[in-house]
Image (spheres, rainbow, N blue to C red):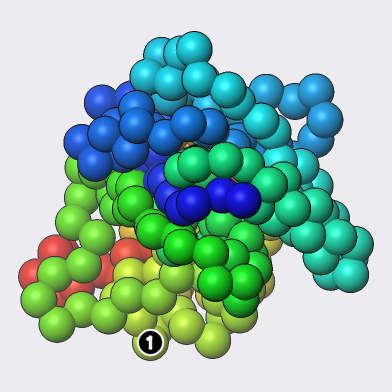
């Protein structure tokens, strides 16, 4: 049975953003587990670390992007069984950070429930990394921040939080224009990083009316919405 499992965040895509601890752990473990969303599909997380783990056994864990929670539980159980049956210390890698909307969190629950030693190795999370790509502060001073998956309940939080991060930006333009009249839209700036740190990266920054919301439906797209402060005007 496996001795210990590391959940290793490999960051947003830039190999130079791998932490020293992540590199150290990946080099010492005996096996690497790589989550994939579809059989035969390449793993972006593995692409980031492949030079570091060259020569090590690599095994894929299938986590399909489906909404059926009961079926998903079956895939998580299969992944857990594969990890559990390994020998020695192993690592499960994930894009970004294992604690932030990561498939590793579901595996973590099963590991903890079965008293298997598990350690999280943090990676650079995408909201922080994308703020860096936009060259803006994410929050300052007493500002409040909220992170919303797929922009859920965005209408409720506009005007309440100074910075809103939207993970996965499909339909974001439609949601914003429905929630805000034309005059209110001028009170916000928005940055969108689509496929950040990859070759086909696209970055936009400006007012809501300036943003091209077409073609930002990739699951690696992230938006940062900033309420304009008086001193910014």
Q: Position of residue 122 (x, y in %)?
A: 33, 53
Q: Which residue is drawn at 49% across and 41% down?
A: 88
Residue identifier under label 1: 160
Left or right, 93 with reference to 205: right
Give above or below for 12 relative to 228.
above
| Residue neighbourhood size for the residue with mark 1, other residues' Cα within 10 Å, grouped as few (<14), some (14–19), many (≥20) | few
Query: In the picture, residue 173 is in which quadrant?
Result: bottom right
Left or right, 229 with reference to 163: left
Give above or below for 210 relative to 41.
below
Left or right, 138 with reference to 49: left
**Along the line of sight, the residue nearer the viewer: 190 or 46:** 46
**Along the line of sight, the residue nearer the viewer: 142 or 103:** 103
**Along the line of sight, the residue nearer the viewer: 230 or 74:** 74
Q: Which residue is drawn at 68% across and 47% down?
A: 85
Q: Residue at x 29, y 32 (%)?
A: 23
**Along the line of sight, the residue nearer the viewer: 220 or 20:** 20
Residue 210 seen in render: no
Give above or below for 103 relative to 226.
above
Quadrant containing the C terminus is bottom left
Secondary structure beneath dot 1 equals loop
Q: Position of residue 217 (x, y in %)?
A: 66, 43
Residue 121 seen in render: yes
Q: Residue at x 14, y 64 (%)?
A: 232
Give above or below for 146 relative to 99.
below
Q: Position of residue 12 (x, y in %)?
A: 41, 39
Left or right, 149 with reference to 67: left
Q: Position of residue 46 (x, y in %)?
A: 53, 27
Query: In the picture, residue 132 is in which quadrant?
Result: top left
């Amino acid at each position: 049975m496996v001795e210990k499992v590391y959940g290793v965040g490999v960051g947003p895509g830039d190999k130079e953003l791998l932490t020293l601890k992540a590199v150290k752990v990946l080099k010492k473990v005996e096996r690497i587990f790589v989550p994939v969303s579809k059989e035969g599909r390449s793993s972006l997380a593995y692409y980031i670390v492949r030079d570091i783990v060259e020569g090590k056994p690599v095994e894929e864990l299938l986590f399909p992007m489906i909404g059926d929670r009961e079926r998903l539980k079956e895939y998580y159980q299969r992944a857990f069984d594969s990890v559990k049956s390994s020998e020695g210390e192993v690592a499960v890698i994930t894009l970004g950070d294992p604690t932030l909307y990561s498939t590793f969190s579901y595996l973590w629950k099963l590991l903890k429930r079965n008293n298997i030693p598990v350690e999280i190795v943090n990676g650079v999370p995408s909201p922080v990394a994308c703020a860096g790509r936009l060259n803006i502060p994410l929050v300052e001073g007493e500002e409040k921040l909220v992170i919303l998956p797929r922009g859920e309940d965005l209408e409720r939080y506009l005007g309440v939080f100074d910075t809103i991060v939207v993970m996965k930006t499909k339909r974001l333009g439609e949601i914003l224009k429905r929630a805000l009249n034309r005059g209110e839209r001028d009170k916000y700036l928005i940055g969108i990083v689509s496929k950040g740190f990859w070759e086909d990266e696209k970055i936009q920054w400006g007012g809501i009316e300036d943003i091209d919301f077409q073609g930002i439906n990739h699951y690696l797209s992230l938006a940062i919405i900033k309420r304009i402060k008086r001193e910014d005007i």
